[in-house]
Image (spheres, grey):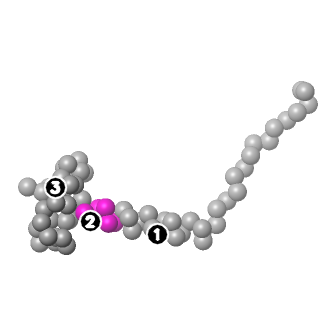
Amino acid sequence: MSDMTFAPARPAPLPLAEILPWAVFGGLLLLIAIYFVGAEEGATSVFQGSMIHEFVHDGRHLLGFPCH
């Protein structure tokens, strides 16, 4: 039993072509989230009413966006 050695497993590298679509998708989701938290109110509002503003209100203050 003492002659057994274990070599560390090396993960296979991921090709950029597999990572890029997911990175773009994640980036778009992040930009949409930042828009709704940071800019969806007043003159830049895309949707009528204040429902979205009230839904992300605490998140705005947590991230440092002023809204009052």
Q: Which mark is residue 54?
A: 3
Q: Residues within 10 Å of mark 1 (few under 14, many from 20)?
A: few
Which residue is at a point 26% across and 65% down the rendered structure image? 35
> Which percent across, then down, holds residue 66?
14, 55
Q: Which residue is mark 1?
A: 24
Q: Which residue is mark 2?
A: 35
> Which percent across, then down, holds residue 17?
60, 71
| 57 lies left or right of 5 | left
Tell me where the magenta segment starts and ends, as one range.
Answer: 31-36
> Which percent across, then down, holds residue 67?
12, 57
Q: Is residue 64 visible?
A: no
Q: In the rendered structure, which amino acid carries the disc numbered 1?
A: Val
The answer to which of 49 and 4 lies nearer the viewer is 49
Q: In the rendered structure, which amino acid carries the disc numbered 3?
A: Glu
Which residue is at a point 90% across and 27% down the rendered structure image? 1
Q: In whole angstroms, how far apart are the C-alphas of marks 3 and 2? A: 14 Å
Q: Earlier in the sequence, mark 3 or mark 1?
A: 1
